[in-house]
Image (cartoon, rainbow, N blue to C red):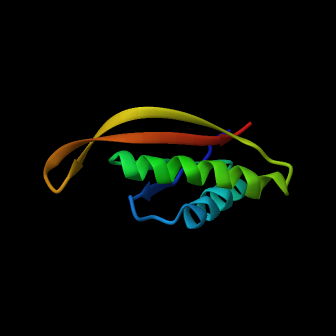
């Protein structure tokens, strides 16, 4: 089974509830998504969003698992380390 995965980029000022809604939508529609965050504050918002998304998905009888990894990305010509989380249904 091939799952089309979208990448949700999370910033330090992202609203966790809004990101959670995007995660829940992607899980319902495609079975998963990828979240990417650069910096401690952005990672904090991303983790909160995954936790909130789990509560949104409970109503549908769905649950997710999250696989974090570190990746190198280019931002404005500069290499940065990002946290990438693969979120998939269990």
Question: Seen in the image, is 58 located left or right of residue 8?
Answer: right
Image quadrant where one finds the N terminus: top right
> In the picture shown, does residue 58 fall above or below 72?
below
Q: Residue at position x 40%, y 52% from top?
A: 42
Residue positioned 16% across, 57% down in the render: 76
Single out the residue that lies furthest toward the left: 77
Q: Residue at x 39, y 59 (%)?
A: 11
Residue 4 visible, this angle: no
Q: Position of residue 83 (x, y in %)?
A: 40, 40
Q: Residue at x 23, y 43 (%)?
A: 80
Location of the C terminus by quadrant is: top right
Q: Nearer the viewer, residue 9 or 43?
A: 43
Q: Position of residue 53 (x, y in %)?
A: 67, 54
Measured as percent of width and height from the top left, residue 77 is found at: 13, 52
Of residues 6 and 42, the one nearer the viewer is: 42
Residue 68 percent across, percent down from the top left: 49, 34
Residue 52 in sight from this viewpoint? yes
Q: How many marks?
A: 0
| 22 in relation to 75, above or below | below
Picture quadrant where residue 19 is located = bottom right
């Amino acid at each position: 089974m091939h799952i089309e995965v979208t990448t949700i980029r999370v910033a330090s000022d992202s609203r966790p509830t809004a990101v959670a809604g995007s995660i829940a939508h992607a899980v319902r529609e495609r079975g998963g998504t990828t979240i990417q965050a650069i910096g401690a504050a952005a990672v904090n918002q991303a983790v909160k969003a995954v936790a909130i998304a789990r509560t949104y998905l409970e109503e549908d009888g769905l649950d997710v698992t999250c696989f974090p990894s570190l990746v190198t990305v280019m931002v404005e010509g500069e290499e940065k380390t990002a946290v990438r989380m693969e979120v998939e249904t269990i």
